[in-house]
Amino acid sequence: MTSSFSLRSAALATVSALFAERTIAGAPADKCPTRFAWEDAQLTDQVISSTDPLLFGFGYPVDTAASASENGGPELPNCKAMPGDASWPSPETWALFNSTLGGALIETVPIAAPCYNNWPQRDAAACEYVTEHWGDPRMHVEDPTSAMFPLYQGRTCLPTDDPDGSNCTLGGYAAYSVAATNVSQIQLALNFARNTNLRLVVRNTGHDFNDRSIGAGALSVWTHKLRDIQFLPDYNCRGYSGPAFKLGSGIMTEELYAAAEENNVTVVGGECRTVGIAGGYIAGGGHSPMSALLGMGADQVLSLEVVLPNGRFVTANEDTNPDLYWALRGAGGSTYGVVTSVTIRAYPKIPNTLMTYSYTTSPNVTTDTFFASLGVYMSYFDRITAAGAYGYFIVVSIGPDQYLFSMMPLWGANMTKPQLTELATPLLNDLAGLGIAITPNVTEYPSMFSAFNGAFPAAEQVGAYDNHAASRIFPKESFEPDRLNDTLAAVRHAVEGGGVLVGYNIRAAPNPAVNQTNSVHPAWRRTTGFFILGASWPANATDAQIQQASETLTNDWMARWRAVSPGGGSYASEGDINEPDFQQSFYGDHYPRLLELKKKYDPTGLFYAPTAVGSEYWYITDQLPWIPTQNGRLCRKK
Ligand SMILES: Cc1cc2nc3c(=O)[nH]c(=O)nc-3n(C[C@H](O)[C@H](O)[C@H](O)COP(=O)(O)OP(=O)(O)OC[C@H]3O[C@@H](n4cnc5c(N)ncnc54)[C@H](O)[C@@H]3O)c2cc1C
Ligand SMILES: *[C@@H]1O[C@H](CO)[C@@H](O)[C@H](O)[C@H]1NC(C)=O
Ligand SMILES: *[C@@H]1O[C@H](CO)[C@@H](O)[C@H](O)[C@H]1NC(C)=O
Ligand SMILES: *[C@@H]1O[C@H](CO)[C@@H](O)[C@H](O)[C@H]1NC(C)=O
Ligand SMILES: *[C@@H]1O[C@H](CO)[C@@H](O)[C@H](O)[C@H]1NC(C)=O
Ligand SMILES: *[C@@H]1O[C@H](CO)[C@@H](O)[C@H](O)[C@H]1NC(C)=O
Ligand SMILES: *[C@@H]1O[C@H](CO)[C@@H](O)[C@H](O)[C@H]1NC(C)=O
Ligand SMILES: *[C@@H]1O[C@H](CO)[C@@H](O)[C@H](O)[C@H]1NC(C)=O
Ligand SMILES: *[C@@H]1O[C@H](CO)[C@@H](O)[C@H](O)[C@H]1NC(C)=O
Ligand SMILES: *[C@@H]1O[C@H](CO)[C@@H](O)[C@H](O)[C@H]1NC(C)=O
Ligand SMILES: *[C@@H]1O[C@H](CO)[C@@H](O)[C@H](O)[C@H]1NC(C)=O
């Protein structure tokens, strides 16, 4: 019996053990979680009638909404309103909105405004702070409007040491934000935006690769303050009994991991400390160092609370609004409503062993040998993920004909040091056979959070505008012997051309202990390799150079990746804003059903984000090819 076979059996045994935990008949009385207190603070008809029903009234009930607009309902305007339009709410109306919100309305001040003389916030010390922390996600997270990828904001207010050199403008930033602390405020915001034809955006942390949390002239719902986290040790509801967490939608990865550590459990989350777990992460699917063992982030969801486009607040789970439950777990944020909280499954505490190593081309390791070693690693993808392990690695050019491979780390979830060493030894032996001798650092940690702190001690840097990414979820067949060479050649072409490969050896493990019937891209269920590819340009590049680099990324490098991965897809949460045929790439065969649900729940098109479900019916004015921004006006295609 081979060693990888024994690891595979161990993984299967794990899955059966988890399955056994699902209670069936004769379960004790349900103990379903209750809503957070601020979720019980809801908008009432009395508040609406005592203010202005035309501004704050609810939309049509879900099932009648589509037919209402088709059968002589009000005709929908072609474009959303912008400041300066006759229809833009007056200062008195904004003030009424603010007082109805209890003072939670914020008028946007761009985060780098202190660097510019055309803003009253001009302040040299504050500018220095913003400039120094521009790459730190935590600074952006705390701002109501900032987004972490300035390219799509339009680069209209970057930090500068020349306060008169240009004027800072709002660009793609929203006009106003609602700093929501209860459900009523979110309902008011959605009703107000729908009734006054404002563009609406949802902003949590601003991590989205394509800035899908901003929009010129928009009203933004800022969910960052919804930060309650409740551990439910004895959740017992709808067929699952065991530990769970109920998370407000502002909770960030490291906050969840810390709470899991404190309560001796394991959860599924990503590798960036500051991403919003119950915001864009779960909405988009959510990949994790735990995915090869336990499945996707979205698979862990037991129930969600959501404010719908018509302003009504509902629950979505297997029993209540099951179609929404399906759609909110994988198909992306900013599409079907504003999620206020999510309940996810937790698992017993497990050990994790991490292995790191790196190597470069050298007199003994030619470029051909270097890429052959990458092929060798790919040939192990299926074996490694089948054992429940995950690899996070980078492949990059470090000089003319010089390359670096860095494993950071190979993560053995629920593995001891001897178990991970046994799993990795055949791969390391094969690399040694190519003349690449590796002495890996192997460290065992007692829990997920301790391993996470070892692997990712600092928040990942953001804020750059000298690069742009695309991604591909390869089906596992792309790494099988008959297709491996073609896959490797396509990857090599991009890396030799200057692309930065951030690779994940990952699968979405089958996990009978959770509901995996959701809208996660079907390609995740067939993958063992998910690769992000970055194209970059000099900091002083012209628009033409950025366009050229973006076109090469999409139409040359990624075209070759698509060609060698039929049946694969791309991950919209870490995707190319220029992705061709985005519906198929980002949503696969789920698209028709997702679009039908979009029309059911959002018939007036309140929610829009680039590449989101239904976004093909909209465009933004005043765009340059290849560098789409959120600066223009949002209009319906006729
Ligand atoms: C450095 C870095 C590392 C990353 N690592 C991982 C990783 O390991 N695994 C992984 O899967 N992904 C990863 N991502 C991608 C990440 O999951 C997505 O960018 C995710 O969308 C971020 O969600 P957010 O809520 O933090 O950000 P935001 O940008 O605020 O929101 C993202 C999208 O979701 C919408 N949204 C946010 N909150 C809500 C809500 N409550 N209701 C409805 N819509 C909402 C927003 O409108 C926007 O469209 C990473 C991203 C970065 C920048
Ligand atoms: C971890 O492995 C043990 C067996 O070694 C198994 O009993 C347990 O269920 C596994 N835990 C998870 C979360 O997979
Ligand atoms: C929601 O919060 C605001 C601000 O604190 C408050 O004024 C308002 O009364 C709250 N709404 C409800 C329904 O409790
Ligand atoms: C909303 O009201 C609060 C409290 O009165 C105030 O601090 C804030 O500036 C107001 N917002 C706007 C946009 O006027
Ligand atoms: C900034 O705006 C002011 C007022 O509109 C204008 O006079 C000035 O020329 C602008 N400065 C730059 C650098 O564009
Ligand atoms: C977690 O485990 C530690 C050590 O095993 C124990 O001391 C602690 O009480 C546990 N905490 C909880 C919340 O169960
Ligand atoms: C998962 O939830 C869906 C509702 O979205 C339901 O139809 C399906 O039966 C559930 N699957 C399992 C395995 O419980
Ligand atoms: C390179 O190869 C030579 C000859 O096989 C060997 O002596 C030397 O130790 C190798 N160098 C490295 C860094 O592996
Ligand atoms: C191995 O990695 C751990 C965790 O990052 C680190 O503390 C340790 O110093 C490393 N050991 C060596 C020999 O590099
Ligand atoms: C893949 O490439 C290797 C090395 O160049 C070669 O030995 C092998 O025959 C090729 N495999 C296929 C299926 O073409
Ligand atoms: C950018 O800077 C480099 C070197 O600093 C210079 O050679 C190049 O001409 C500059 N490009 C543009 C478009 O200004």
Image (cartoon, rainbow, N blue to C red):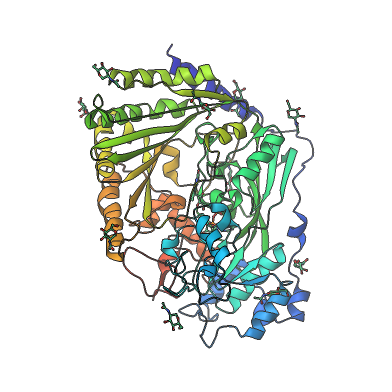
Q: Is residue 315 above or below residue 244?
A: below
Asked whether residue 334 appears in the rendered view, the answer is no
Please provide percent x and percent y for residue 329: 55, 49
Give the quarter of the figure containing the C terminus: bottom left
Query: What residue is drawn where x is 54% and y is 34%?
Result: 290
540 relative position to 632: left or right? left
Q: Quick check: 461 above or below 604? A: above
Residue 528 in picture, x, y percent from top left:
41, 35
Tag count: 0
The residue under the point 53% across, 19% down is 417
Q: On the image, which quarter does residue 564 sit in? A: top left
Quadrant location of the N terminus in the rendered image:
top left
Decide: is 592 above or below 118.
Answer: above
Q: Position of residue 309 (x, y in %)?
A: 59, 67
| The quarter of the picture showing ligand 3 | bottom right
Q: Residue at x 72, y 35 (%)?
A: 263
- Residue 308, by quadrant, is bottom right
- The reply to whether residue 357 is visible in this rendering is yes
Residue 83 lies, in percent from the top left, at 52, 81
Q: Is residue 337 left or right of residue 148?
A: right
Which residue corresponds to the image point at 57% horizontal and 41% vertical from the top-left? 269
Asked if residue 118 lies left or right of residue 314, the reply is left
